[in-house]
Each structure stands twice: as C-alpha cells, then as structure tokens.
Amino acid sequence: MKNQELLLVPGPTPVVDEIYDALASETRGHTDPRFVEVFKRAIGNTKKLFRTDGEVYIVAGSGTLAMEMAIVNTVARGERLLVISHGYFGDRFTPLAKAFGIEVDVLQSEWGKRVDPALVEQKVKEKAYKAVTITHADTSTGVASDLDTLIPIIKASGALAVVDGVVATAAMDEDMSKAYGGHEAYRIDVVLTGSQKAIGIPPGLALVAFSKTALAARAAMETIPAYYTDIDNWRPIMGNPAMYFATPPVNLIYALDVALQIVLEEGMKAREARHVAFGKAVRAALGVYGMTALANEDVAAPTLSCLLYPEGVEDATFRASLASRGVIVAGALAHLAGKAFRIGHMGNTTAAMLEEGIVAIGEALQEQGLDVNTEQAVRVFSETIEAVQA
C-alpha cells in the first residue's frame, strides 16, 4: 500500500509496506496457536529492545494508557511523585497522578529548555519521592532529557526512575540494563511508550517495560486502584499469550512483530545515529528559511522539532498549503499555537521523505511571499547528514 500523503507530524509516523502487509493479514482468534506464536515473538523482541531484567506489557491503548500503567503500578495513594517536565506532555503526569491520590511536585522548565539538574538534586534531598518521571523527549517542545545526568541523581535518592519514551523509544537510548554513572544500582526502572512514533506502526498499542525493582514495588503495594492497567492481571498473559484477560488487537500485534524485527535488524546504535543525523539536518535546512528551532541544538530531540515561524507566516495558511502538496505537519501547542509548527523525523522516515518535506515547506513559504531558496535548503540538509555521519 502506497502512502497517499507524507505524514511528518510527531506521530503517527509513516508506515512502511511490510507493516501494512502485516496489518492486512488474516485476523485470527486471539488464542489461535498461530497468533500466539507471533505475540510471543513480539513480547520477546520488546524485551530485547529495552534489555530489561523484568517484564514488558503490551496492551491495547495509547501512550496515555502506558503513562497510567507506569504510575499506578509503582506509586500508591499518599506517596510522592516528582515530575520533571520539559513541556505539555511532561505536565500531563500531574493530573494523572492526582487522579489516584498521589502527592505530586513538579519541576517545570521554560519551553525549549531543560530543567536544571541541580534543582532536581535539591528537590530529591528535600523530600522522599517514591518515583520521579522523566519525559525522554517532549512532543510539544522537541526537548530531549539528559538521562546520563538525571538517572544517577534519581537513583541515589532511592526513588524509582520512570521514563516516558513515547516519542523516544526505538530512536533514543533506553537500555534498561545500562548502569548509569558506572553504578550497578543506577538503572531505569520503567519505560513507557506507544506504538505510533519511532516504532513505526499505527496508534493503538501501549507498551511498558518494568525492571525487577519496579516489579517489586508493585508487589509491595498488594492492591492498586486499577483493573485494566494492573500489571498483575496482565502478567500471566505476557508469560503465555494463549491465556486470556482482555482481547488483544490481533492485527496490531502482527504489525508490532514486523516493526520490531525492522528495528532490531537495523540495530539500535545505527538507528540512534540515523535519528541524530536526521534531526540536525532538518533543523539546519529549515534554518535556511529563517525558521528557528525552539530547542537549542544541545538539548534538541532527534525525533521531532518545533520550529518558530519567521515574520510574515500565517500558521493555518502555511499548514493548509503544505497539506495541498500532500505533506502533513502539526501545529504547535499551548502558548506557541500559531507561532510555530512541529515536524517529525523519526521511525521509518527516510532522507528522501524529509527532503521532499523540506522542498514543500519552502514552496509553502514562497506562496506567502517569503523569498526562500529551496535548493540551498536541500543542499544543507544533505551536507549536514554527511557531516554528522562522518
């Protein structure tokens, strides 16, 4: 199936033919041995992706459901959660946790910047937190978190480290076996994500990986205020998908199986490097048009960018012009609405796709009367990729 439009929003991302073919496979019963075998392989490959010593959970739902599953299974009513927020999606942990009676404190950065690690260190010394959330890359701002700095601070305090990988997983390093700062106990405890970003399949799956430490936290809580998101209800199924708790989305599991094989075949080191190169190249090329990335290059995510418009650009007109050319980007959120747009450069997106998008963006700007050079932008794009890869 050929994609009719070039989808360059920060998720969903372009779906490749192999994954479309998997989605179009015959739907079988969720206890059919042929499907069970596929599900087992997908679970195994999800464990390989995260390299967890614990368990992974793959359920029907969005990234928001994965956020809830991560928090409700690790932090009890009345316990404290610290949220490190670099934008809109970091902020969402606050109402989510409060809905379950969890005490929440927030360290919130100016949009486009990171929270100062010194503030995190100070905060975890002031109070005892059961867990601390880090949005690995925030979809609203394009800011990436520095896990190498934050994980040791969090783990030294005795808190669980919960990483929101919705717009990072399968593009940025989320190795749960990694000992941060060289300390064996300083590891990520939970990673949560969705299916439609860098993994590269349509929306509909929530994936959460728990370390043994995080599983022990769930066991110590005994009961939790959840049913569908209680990992104790899902654990038997993840061990043996022939068992039943709730019906899995059969065809999305087919798609996940193929997508994970694509990810693992490319290899995470190569995949991470490709995303870094694409991110830098897209921002450099759009800089030729007078666009400025909200996040400076030293904190910018490799998976998406939020670009501020040059003077004279009308947001709705610009994005409608792009859509008429078959290129879809996303508007900015909150106070940046109308002042910026967001572009995804992740998953199975190719350099050719991004080059096409850069040309279309230039043409849309020209349509609004801006004097921009699309040939120069394309040249900068290619040269930047070569320079980063070199």
Image (cartoon, rainbow, N blue to C red):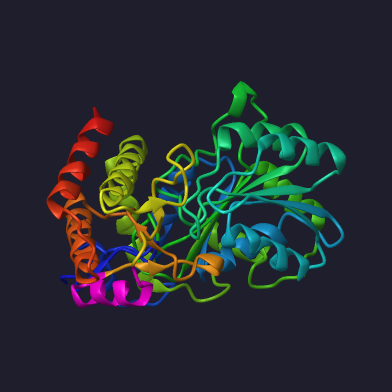
Measured from the top left, where is residue 130 in percent x and y? 79, 48
Measured from the top left, where is residue 312 in percent x and y? 34, 67
- Seen from the viewer's position, the closer of residues 66 and 290 is 290
Camera sees residue 263: yes
Please report the residue visible at 49 percent of the width from the left and 41 percent of the height from the top: 299
Measured from the top left, where is residue 152 in percent x and y? 66, 31
Would residue 148 be found to the left or right of residue 216 on screen?
left
User: Against 233, is 345 above or below?
Assistant: above
Residue sitting farthest toward the top: 182
Q: Assess whether residue 315 is covered by the magenta stretch.
A: yes
* Image-quadrant location for residue 387: top left
Measured from the top left, where is residue 148 in percent x and y? 57, 32
Please report the residue visible at 55 percent of the width from the left and 38 percent of the height from the top: 146
Camera sees residue 33: no
Looking at the rendered image, the quarter that the C terminus falls into is top left
- Seen from the viewer's position, the closer of residues 3 and 31 is 3
Looking at the rendered image, the quarter that the N terminus falls into is bottom left
- Seen from the viewer's position, the closer of residues 333 and 59 is 333
User: Against 193, is 150 above or below?
Assistant: above
Q: Assess whether residue 147 is covered by the magenta stretch.
A: no
Q: Which residues are magenta?
A: 313-327
Q: Main secondary structure of the magenta part?
A: helix
Please report the residue visible at 58 percent of the width from the left and 28 percent of the height from the top: 179
Q: How many marks?
A: 0
* Image-quadrant location for residue 274: top left
Please report the residue visible at 44 percent of the width from the left and 71 percent of the height from the top: 338
